[in-house]
Image (spheres, rainbow, N blue to C red):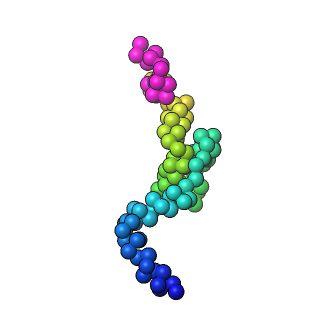
Amino acid sequence: MAESYFSKQIDVWWNQNTTLQYAMERMLQAFKTNITPAQAMDLFTRPKYSKISWIEHLMYLNAVAGASSGDSDYLVLKNIVQYASQEIRIVLMAKVHHQRTDYLQ
């Protein structure tokens, strides 16, 4: 029974798309998690676990960025600004607040 179902479906499956990219996109659609900006900020500011490498930590942060629906770039820049030197803080603030022009003075 399973073999006959497979035989009937194989042409349909091949016609859809045969690439790994297609499978990954379908899995992403099925299992994608969206998080709020507040949740993203909490995850971004947690300290790195001592048992994982920096590469694994970067992958974790990229996953958080992907799940936060594009707001993560703004959140990262906004939180970097508060730790920047005074000279660069003004320029970074201009990137965070697009209406600011006092950095031009």
Q: Residue at x 47, y 85 (%)?
A: 3
Choose between 72 and 102: the one closer to the eye: 72
Q: Position of residue 16 (x, y in %)?
A: 39, 66
- Is the C terminus in the top left, top right, bottom left or bottom right quadrant? top left
- Against 35, is 22 above or below? below
Residue 100 on the magenta segment: yes
- The number of discs equals 0
Choose between 79 and 67: the one closer to the eye: 67
Residue 3 on the magenta segment: no
- Against 39, is 94 above or below? above
Q: Position of residue 81 (x, y in %)?
A: 51, 31
> Horizontally, is 35 left or right of 7 in the view?
right
Q: Is residue 38 visible?
A: yes
Task: Determine which quarter of the picture holds residue 42.
Answer: top right
Q: Residue at x 49, y 55 (%)?
A: 59
- Against 85, is 66 above or below? below
Mainly helix, strand or loop, the magenta region?
helix
Choose between 23 and 45: the one closer to the eye: 23
Q: Is residue 57 visible?
A: no
Choose between 92 and 15: the one closer to the eye: 15
Q: Position of residue 70 (x, y in %)?
A: 50, 42
Q: Position of residue 85 (x, y in %)?
A: 48, 28
Magenta segment boundaries in residue numbering: 90-105
- Residue at the extreme top: 105
Q: Residue at x 55, y 55 (%)?
A: 32
